Image (cartoon, rainbow, N blue to C red):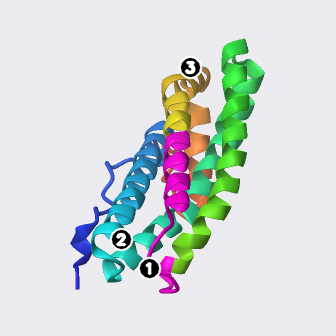
Amino acid sequence: MRTPQAFPGLHTPAAGFEQPFAMLEACHARVQRMLTLLQKLCAHLRAQGCDDAARQAARDVLRYFDQAGPLHHEDEEKHLFPLLRAQGDADVRALVERLAQDHVRMAADWAQLRTPLLALAQGERCSFSAQEEACFDAFAAHYARHIEGEEQRAYPAAQKLLGAAALQAMGQEMAARRGARLPSLVAPE
């Protein structure tokens, strides 16, 4: 039996909610790790077959894209997209519309992609078809383009528009939706 170390861990650079843009970028790093894990899972299944490590990797990918991924998209849709639609230039507004459409498409794609992953995680199957692997690859490529647009253009544009109080409120709301508490950054009077 293979050990779980056959797949990468979930270590991420430390980022807290008091720095919401660092948190958003850390989420992107996790997305990229989960997509890499999915690629390694496919290669593992082809080379070594299905085992406990493969089923655990499938569960890890499912957990991320079922739970954390939607929260991340919600963060952007709630805090960044409205701001950039209202105050961004024409190019940024067009980018935001594409990014919002990406979120819809990625959610629909994920709804289909999770089915074979769930079956593998539950021991109901032991491999993916070539077509399913191609869909996983397309999902990863779409996410890569999406992340690039956000980190290279949308995030910098939003950061220029947000003051310290708005950033603090954004971080507190992000933390609250996840059940975490963010200590107040404002000194008591």
Q: Is residue 150 above or below residue 26?
A: above
Whether the magenta-drawn stretch holds residue 135 is answered as: yes
The numbered dot on residue 126 is 1
SS majority, magenta: helix
Start-end of magenta stretch: 120-143
- Which residue is identified by label 3? 160
Tell me which amino acid carries mark 3: Lys
Give the mark nearer the N terminus: 3 vs 1. 1
The numbered dot on residue 113 is none
Which part of the image, by quadrant, shows the N terminus?
A: bottom left
Tell me which amino acid carries mark 1: Cys
Whether the magenta-drawn stretch holds residue 71 is answered as: no
Quote the CA–CA distance across marks 1 and 2.
Answer: 7 Å
**Whole-percent x, y for residue 127 in the image:** 45, 73
- Residue shown at the point (72%, 47%) measured from the top left: 104
- Residue shown at the point (47%, 65%) measured from the top left: 61
- Which residue is identified by label 2? 45
Q: Is residue 94 above or below residue 150?
A: above
Q: Are marks 1 and 2 in contact (CB under 8 Å)?
A: yes
Quote the CA–CA distance across marks 3 and 2.
Answer: 46 Å
The one nearer the camera, 20 or 56, is 56
3 vs 1, front mark: 1
**Whole-percent x, y for residue 138 in the image:** 54, 46
| Image quadrant where residue 170 sits | top right
Q: Is residue 108 visible?
A: yes
- Residue shown at the point (42%, 57%) measured from the top left: 34
Give the mark nearer the N terminus: 3 vs 2. 2
